[in-house]
Image (cartoon, grey):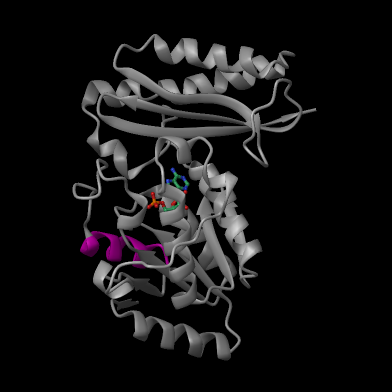
Amino acid sequence: MTVIRAARRMAARSERLRRQGKQLGVVPTMGALHEGHLSLVRAAVKANDVVIVTIFVNPLQFGPHEDFRRYPRNLPRDIRLARRAGADIVFAPSVQEISPTGFGTTIDVGPIGERLEGRFRPGHFRGVATVVAALFHLTKPTHAYFGQKDYQQTLVIKRLVKDLCLDVRLHVLPTVRERDGVAMSSRNRYLRVEQRRQAAVLWRALRAGRERIRTGERRASAVAARMRRLIKAIPSARIDYVVAVDAATLAPVRRLRGCVALLVAVWIGRTRLIDNLLVDVS
Ligand code: AMP
């Protein structure tokens, strides 16, 4: 496996691979790899000739008071895990390497990036879209892999790919969970033992929401209220949002039909967690 730090070297390598007609799978990550990331790498390995894992803690997608500086970083461990999962290349550029003079150009994907996460983390998806576009430009994937864990992000990337006519097929893979249902996340390590236990309320709330829908509830507000009640029972939990919305647009709806996304963003102490569940309302 090759580790590449330089942007120009990455671009030259992927250019060559594309010219040879290779299927090139790319898995963009911020490192601190866990089973969630590795499930994407394994899926990419199955379907491509060459798999590139990008590791870049993207400063643009963090707000001024967010955890950019303390975000977990361990490149040697990530390289080891990526290699074991079958990756061929780890592309781990420095911030300086990706954007030596800072970003002048940014990509704004419109309303899909402004709802929910976008409202609580202004500029977040502009940061994501801009850097993913740059990473796609350097790695030239035929296929790119993302987790449903960050559901709104997958919609943002879909929009980016469509609007900019990028020649890449997107694959969204299921959320990998711990045994108690907590979605794997690099941020789970911020949680103390008791908080980690409490974090399972997100998954419990999502399942309860789905259960309400399955037993016939069609009012979005009633489903959200049911989820909110469970979360509020945890004293250290503070809700940013808990919603049942249209899964394609994330627009609020009164009555649930078609594909519905249940989405939650909750602080457990000083750690912000997100999770979601898609429900087919037929
Ligand atoms: P991140 O390093 O948090 O930016 O995540 C990199 C990619 O891994 C994104 O596409 C995430 O959606 C995906 N991912 C993160 N956690 C999980 C998980 N628990 N299950 C599946 N995919 C995940």
> Residue 209: which quarter of the image?
top right
Q: Check residue 239 for magenta coloring.
A: no
How far from the left and from the top, in percent, is residue 252? 64, 28
Q: Is residue 107 above or below residue 120?
A: below
How many marks are shown on the rendered structure? 0
Q: Check residue 80 for magenta coloring.
A: yes
Q: Is residue 11 above or below residue 37?
A: below
Image quarter of the N terminus: bottom left
Residue at 53% of width from left, 59% of height from top? Answer: 145
Q: Is residue 56 above or below residue 279?
A: below
Is residue 38 among the parts visible in the rendering? no
How far from the left and from the top, in percent, is residue 182? 41, 31
Q: Is residue 256 above or below residue 217?
A: below
The kind of secondary structure the magenta stretch mainly shows is: helix
Q: Nearer the viewer, residue 277 or 51?
A: 277
- Segment tinted magenta in the rendering: 75-86
Q: Is residue 259 left or right of residue 147?
A: right
Residue at 45% of width from left, 54% of height from top? Answer: 126
